Amino acid sequence: MENDKRFNYIYSKLVKSDNDLSGIVAYHYYKKQKIEWCKAFRDKNNRDASNSEIESFHSTFTEQAIDNLKSKANATVEVFASDIISKNVNNIKIQVEEAFKNNNKFWGNVWVNVVSSFVYSIFILIITLIVWSIKHDIFSELLALFLNEPK
């Protein structure tokens, strides 16, 4: 039961909700460090670490170390979201170019531009929401918005 408290402590420091993608990525980085530490310990000592030795590993996760994991995770999520947007923007450009080649009518071209601008705006909105949700707790923000309560 004591082990559960250690793991829950780190998890609860990193992941704030089931939808906290950045926190989940930060927890992944923590688990990766723990696995690497356990392997290095086993290689050096020819045995697995005891509970007290694992506890000493956990004690290295200060608030600053946790903040560093969160920052690394935020950067990872931002890069991932940016890549998704970039790939989709290129697909939209290709579709628009094909539409221009296949349709020389003025109003048809106007319609294609309107639709592609709308789709591009949706992608920008999605990336903005992803980045914003990384830095804010969405649920408390919405609750405060609807209840007109200050943070």
Image (spheres, rainbow, N blue to C red):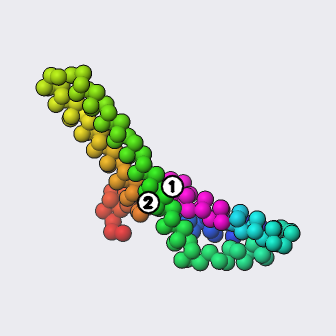
**Number of marks in the rendered image:** 2
Q: Quadrant of the C terminus?
A: bottom left
Task: Give the camera-side residue of 140 and 90.
Answer: 90
- Say whether residue 28 is magenta: yes
Q: Which residue is mark 1?
A: 21
Q: Quadrant of residue 13?
A: bottom right
Amino acid type for the residue under numbered disc 2: Ile
- Find residue 42 and name its label: none
Residue 33, placed above or below residue 131: below
Q: Which of the two discs, 2 and 1, labels the residue nearer the N terminus?
A: 1
Q: Position of residue 5 (x, y in %)?
A: 69, 69
Q: Position of residue 9 (x, y in %)?
A: 63, 69
Circle 1 crowding by C-alpha within 10 Å: few under 14, some 14–19, many from 20: some
What's the magenta region?
18-33
Residue 34, placed above or below residue 130: below
Please give the name of the residue rendered at 31% of the width and 31% of the height, measured from the top-left corner: 95
Residue 78, placed above or below residue 43: above
Q: Which residue is mark 2?
A: 134
Residue 145, placed above or below residue 99: below
Please give the name of the residue rendered at 65% of the width and 62% of the height, measured from the top-left corner: 31
View extreme (front): residue: 101
- Say whether residue 128 is magenta: no
Question: Do the numbered discs 2 and 1 sit on residues whose CB atoms are within 8 Å?
Answer: yes
Residue 138 in sight from this viewpoint? no
Please give the name of the residue rendered at 72% of the width and 68% of the height, measured from the top-left corner: 37
- Disc 2 to disc 1, C-alpha distance: 8 Å
